[in-house]
Image (cartoon, grey):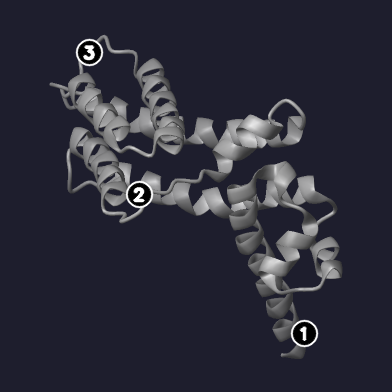
Amino acid sequence: MLAAMSTSIRLDKRDLILAKGAEVMTRRGYHGAGVQEIVLAAGVPKGSFYHYFASKEDFALQALAQVYQPRLERYALALGNPALSPRQRILGYYAELVQRFARQEKLEYHCFIGSLSFEMAELSPAIGAAVDAILQRSADILQACLEQAQAAGELAADEDCRNLAAFIANAWQGALTRLKVASDTRVLDDFLQRLERLLAA
């Protein structure tokens, strides 16, 4: 019993550092987020950081998995919803994201994976590979839904679903980058309008 409780405490502390540290790194970037700032945000001693993570790079890799695995699971569930047609799933998912931004009183957008992409993709092959794997998994989920749309007659029979999924995924990432720069949801409205045209029956 005591051993199980000790394990739970250790896991909870690691999760806390990952959650708070990811927030810091998202706002300040990889290079702007020091280990001291991460542990202060988590409310733990500096030694705790190095107990769970071999380095800041190791922390970033584990934080990527912690943040994006649940998001990918939610994406897969939304795009696999049998109650909606494949086209409805895709359009509904992105429409809800756009509406979520529109409801913010003060538009703010910070992207953990985007920040790491810009700063570290070339400097750290391990982080670059992890980011690419997450983005590719997202595109794969979208491709599977597009293939279902094609089978249901919602897309042309000769549509290249792999290419279309990559284009949509890349366009969304680009729209989010522009959102961060411009702080204007029109970029997301433009994305959604074009997506509707792309998926027109």
- Determine which residue is flagged by label 3: 157
Q: Position of residue 44 (x, y in %)?
A: 75, 73
Identify which residue is drawn at 22% across, 46% down: 82
* Viewer-nearest of discs 2 and 3: 2
Counting residues from the N terminus, which is met first, the one under dot 2 or under dot 3? Answer: 2
Q: Nearer the viewer, residue 102 or 11?
A: 102
Q: Amino acid at mark 2?
A: Leu
Give the residue at mark 2: 77
Counting from the top left corner in percent of width and height, residue 19 is at 60, 62
Residue 129 is at least partly visible in this image: no
Amino acid on which disc 3 is placed: Ala
* Among the two numbered marks 1 and 3 on one chain, the one whose residue lies closer to the N terminus: 1
Q: Name the kind of residue labelled 1 in the image.
A: Ala
Q: Position of residue 38 (x, y in %)?
A: 72, 61
- Neighbours of disc 1 within 10 Å: few (<14), some (14-19), many (20+): few
**Is the C-beta separation of discs 1 and 3 under 8 Å?**
no
Residue 75: image x %, image y %? 38, 45
- For mark 1, what is the residue? 3
Residue at image position (74%, 66%) is: 39
Q: CA distance from mark 1 to mark 2?
A: 35 Å
Q: Residue 144 occupies which quadrant of the picture?
A: top left
Q: Earlier in the sequence, mark 1 or mark 2?
A: 1
